[in-house]
Image (spheres, rainbow, N blue to C red):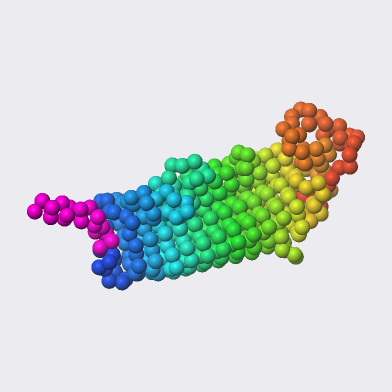
Amino acid sequence: MRYLTLFLFALFLHANPLQEAINSASAGSKIELGKGRYKGGIIIDKPLIIEGAEDKSAHIIGDNTSSVITVTSSNVILKNLHISASGDSHEGLDAAVLVKDASNVVLENNKITDSLFGINFQKVSNSKIINNFITSKPRDLGVRGDGIVFWYSHNNIVRNNHLYKSRDMVAWYSSKNIFENNLGEWSRYSLHFMYANDNLIQNNIFEHNSVGIFFMYSHDITARNNTIKNSLGTFGLGLGLKDSSNFIIEDNNIIYNARGIFLDQSPYMQGGVNVFRRNNILYNANAVQFLGLREKSLFSENIFKGNTELISSDTPKNDMPYVEWRRNYWDDYEGFDQNQDGIGDIPYKRYAYADKLWLYNENIKFFYGTVAMSLLNFLAKLAPFSQPELMVADNEPLIKAAM
């Protein structure tokens, strides 16, 4: 009898009532969870709705191994849940919610904590991630998991989420997704794209991250109405493009970053054009940095104000003829507008004089902004001891900043 009691008790310890409820539920039914703690490590392999109260008092807790919830079916909704305690394996991509080979999945109004990866979409389409709070495990920045991961996932919506102290929000080989109205803070890459084409990024706020948005090997993307600020530190960057083409970057606020915009061989595709228009590029240490240009970029109607350095190129060969500047506002423009049409009467031109020394020499960069470098640059303008390079030529500079 004593053996039987212990045996039954062991069965109870290993039982998972939530998994049993899932197993016994008919496809398409709804499981409502009341306030309480529920054992994680569950698998959802049929269309179901699992919903808690709006205060997220239904808490599904993993055992710090593997993913807390794995979804392998389409037409699943997870709503109003607190999900925590995933495993700690980067190789296993341990997540609060792992969704694989599915469509029409909705994750809404959930709170995800103490989970290495937050939400991991693997080959998922036509699904929604809406109004979730996501944070990783308390690890150093580089070894946290990503808040949201897309892998070969298309036609999804990521809206109104708050990512806090995760690593990245990243999309690999994923297209036609919409990322809008999200807040990302105190992470590494707030949003990172790799081989991800034809996506829309709008109305997000990304602040206090190492990098706001970075695009690599991608094309045909629009990023508009985003605010990217306070990306500081050695690699601090607001918005960057690497080997990326046919972008529209418009109406964004890029503020207080170590580097505002960074373009590395972008556009990359032959005949490609990247368009930057009506962006507020304000108070960055370096407003726009170029590396290895090969195709055309167009900057029009942008506001350049309060930046320590406006334009720099990290290649000894001057690639700036690939860039067209049109009707931008430059806060150091010294011309007039006699006919009051809002356009300066003479072109805005900016040259690199002694500045070229620090552009290509990391050791000399230490002295940039010092009195010695300022004096050297001033003397070079009076009597150039090297041929200055034309960095910017805007033939129709704006007189007023319409912010």
Residue 289 pos. (x, y %): 71, 47
Q: Is residue 248 visible?
A: no
Snapshot quadrant of residue 137: top left
| Residue occupying the far bottom of the picture | 27
| Residue occupying the far left of the picture | 1
Snapshot quadrant of residue 80: bottom left
Count of picture labels: 0
Q: Residue at x 80, y 38 (%)?
A: 357
Q: Residue at x 28, y 53 (%)?
A: 38
> Up-down: is 19 above or below 351?
below
Q: Residue at x 76, y 27 (%)?
A: 371
Residue 364 pos. (x, y %): 76, 34
> Up-down: is 257 above or below 395?
above
Judged left or right of residue 246, residue 136 is left
Highlighted magenta segment, given as a residue range: 1-20
Judged left or right of residue 398, residue 133 is left
Residue 120 pos. (x, y %): 45, 58
Residue 203 pos. (x, y %): 54, 54
Secondary structure, magenta segment, majority class: helix
On whether residue 9 falls in the magenta region, the answer is yes
Q: In the image shown, does 140 or 282 lie closer to the viewer?
A: 140
Judged left or right of residue 61, residue 130 is right
> Up-down: is 312 above or below 69?
above
Judged left or right of residue 356, residue 41 is left
Q: In the image shown, does 294 or 394 lie closer to the viewer?
A: 294
